[in-house]
Amino acid sequence: MLQLKNVNLTLEGEQGKKQILKDISLTLEKNKIYVMTGPNGGGKSSIAKIIMGIYQPTDGQILLEGEDISTLGVSERARLGIGYAFQQPPRFKGIKVKDVLELAAGDNAKVNICDLLYDVGLCSQDYLDREIDASFSGGELKRVEIASILARKLKVAVFDEPEAGIDLWSFQKLTETFENLNHMSDTTIVIISHQERILRLAHQVIVVSEGMISEITTPDKFLGEIEKLETDCRCKNNCTFIGGRTDVQCDR
Amino acid sequence: MFNVIDKKMLAAVADLHGIPQGAYNIRKNGQGVERNTTANIDIVTKKDKPGIDIIVKPGTKNESVHIPVILSQGMSDMVYNTFEIGEGSDVLVVAGCGIHNSSSQTAQHDGIHEFFIRRGARMKYVEKHYGEGDGSGQKVLNPKTIIEIEEGGSAELEMIQIEGVDQTVRDTEVRLHKNARLIVTERLLTTSGQNAESNITVELIGEGATAQILSRSVARDDSVQVFHLNMRGYAPCRGHIQCDSIIMDKARVSSIPEITAYHSEAELVHEAAIGRIASEQLMKLMTLGLTEEEAENTILKGFLA
């Protein structure tokens, strides 16, 4: 179980200090899938990076199975069983797919790296010995990134927009991969996504907006509200679902 | 014959863990100490100057020649080696020089290697340079490589200097005739106050000649690297230079490209990049549980592999 308690994050930007996350509190249970969604720039990736330790919280606490890990760095949290699939993974001249997957697997002897590549829709024969260099397309890179998370034995796995760059044909495979991970392990899965099919996998949908958690809901409720907004509002001018008798507040 | 240090250096520069198969000539501290020739590969000591002639008979296939040089004391050694790679042959040549200098004097090896790759012959040439020893004496290596590739011949050069050489100026000149082919892979790592300069000039003289140079280097500490990679096309031909450097600490790297076409159907490309290790690369490996230092080493090892 991973808990965030009153986490704040302020970063130094070009225009001075900016508060990115405001009083985030979350409890993420094991063996559950959470999908974080919400507008771009709302703070989803920042929450992911706070979990991984890439950002250190300005204040607040992060607990992994009750142990305070707030001040631990990235490597230490990784070794405790936290993993993060980058939204835009880096390329490496001279490092092969096989090297990264072997590093990721570590002493996790159960892992067969050929199977991992199959799970993300890549043929191991074509990819194992390929360098992860500029010849890799964005989609190929994302798949290797996801495989590098699947290789690990994790308590918490965070995927930052895993569907970006994945073609429709492979999409089914991707959702199955998350389902399998959920069935085969106790890992807490956090996925940042805007895709309906990914949202449908969630036990809980966490809506993040303006650096805060605006709602924790279920996929049906969340998708129902969006559908209602689509049908009831014709102006598409930032109208919002407010619930109650009028449901949609439309400025038309 | 060989002590522990000699054996370590032979392993580093020629992957030799015993007496090699096939033809070889091992030179130690300015003297030839071991030699073996085969029915197809002859090695003859030059009469007019220090060095050897290596003669590969036409049609020789799948044979190798090892010609490592080791220096284990402060001294200056200079050799001229000539290679005659006979028509239609296919051979591996492993050169390389290891210096163990624990003295306060300079240990220097300057080698001039001249190759004639005859029609349709193929040669793979591996040259590794390595220095060690805790003396204050400099370890200096200045190799000069001159290659003539005749019609349909090909040469693949792997030139690697990974550790411990204080000063190096490497000159490589290659001339390619009709349909000749060249691939050069260069790997260079400099640390502390080391200086390295690599000058490669490739002349594509014959129609259909192709050449590719892939140079990767890492410069650490206060070291300095200079690359002059120069390609000239005199006929319908194709040439590609790719020069990539990782710069760290207070090092300095210059990459000076030159491509010249003397023919309208010469296609020449030069790509050069210098940059530090991207922080996302370090971060990615750290999210797999590596420390920052381990991540850095993994990236450098892969880059120079």
Image (cartoon, coloured by chain):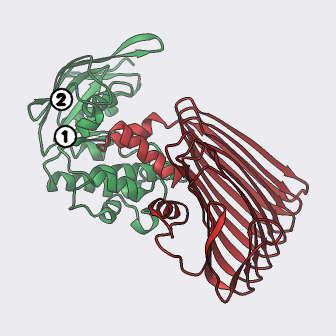
In this rendering, is residue A184 above or below B281? below
On the rendered structure, is A184 left or right of B243?
left
- The colour chain A appears in is green
Residue B10 placement (x, y as % from top left)? 52, 64
Find residue A198 and report its image quarter. Answer: top left
In this rendering, is residue B141 above or below B90? above
- The colour chain B appears in is red
Residue at 25% across, 61% down: A111
Dot 2 falls on which chain?
Answer: A
Residue at 83% across, 59% down: B203
Find residue B167 and report its image quarter. Answer: top right
Dot 1 falls on which chain?
Answer: A
Q: Earlier in the sequence, mark 2 or mark 1?
A: 2
Provide the secondary structure element on which disc 1 rests.
helix
Q: Are marks 2 and 1 in contact (CB under 8 Å)?
A: yes
- Amino acid on which the number 2 mark rests in the picture: Ile
- Residue at the far left in the pictured view: A66
Note whether residue B288 is visible: yes
The residues bearing labels 2 and 1 have C-alpha atoms spaced at a distance of 9 Å
Residue at 70% across, 69% down: B155
Residue A147 placement (x, y as % from top left)? 33, 54
Instruction: Please name the residue that numbered disc 2 is placed on.
Output: A69
In this rendering, is residue B305 above or below A8? below
- Amino acid on which the number 1 mark rests in the picture: Leu
Instruction: Please name the residue that numbered disc 1 is placed on.
Output: A80
